[in-house]
Image: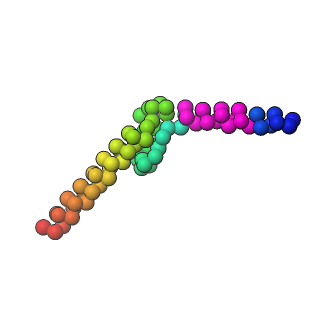
Amino acid sequence: MGTNVGYFYFVLTLALVILTIIFVPERARLKLEHIDDYFESKVPAWKASIGRNKEIAEENILGVHADGMLHGTKQVH
């Protein structure tokens, strides 16, 4: 087969990359609970973005810190 093997694997890899982009959403910085909500919301994978994930993560982090600070002040007083 010679160089045709390389062409075959190139086409196969290209097809898998395209399918991954279409069917697997971006899940960077998301907790498992957010990922579950994301899949249940039926948002298409190609509309996923790292920017939106950063916003969700920052909201979650800010919420956790705010809750921790509130609990801390309740315990002190």
Choose between 59 and 6: the one closer to the eye. 6
* Membership of 51 in magenta stretch: no
The extreme front residue here reads: 3
Residue 10 placement: quadrant: top right
| In the depicted structure, whether residue 6 falls above or below residue 74 | above
Comparing 43 with 48, the one in front is: 48
- Residue 12 visible from this viewpoint: yes
Residue 13, given in percent of the width and then of the height, sits at 68, 37
Q: Position of residue 60 (x, y in %)?
A: 32, 49
Residue 17: in magenta span: yes
The reply to whether residue 40 is in sight is no
Magenta segment boundaries in residue numbering: 9-22
| In the displayed structure image, the side of residue 76 where residue 61 appears, left or right | right
Q: Residue drawn at (66%, 34%), measured in percent from left and top?
A: 14
Position in image of residue 47 (x %, y %): 45, 31
Query: Is 64 located above or below residue 40 in the figure?
Result: below
Q: Is residue 12 left or right of residue 70?
A: right
What residue lies at 16% left-to-right and 69% top-to-bottom?
A: 76
Identify the residue shown where x is 41% and y is 34%.
Answer: 41
Magenta stretch: dominant secondary structure:
helix
Above or below, 57 against 72 in this view is: above
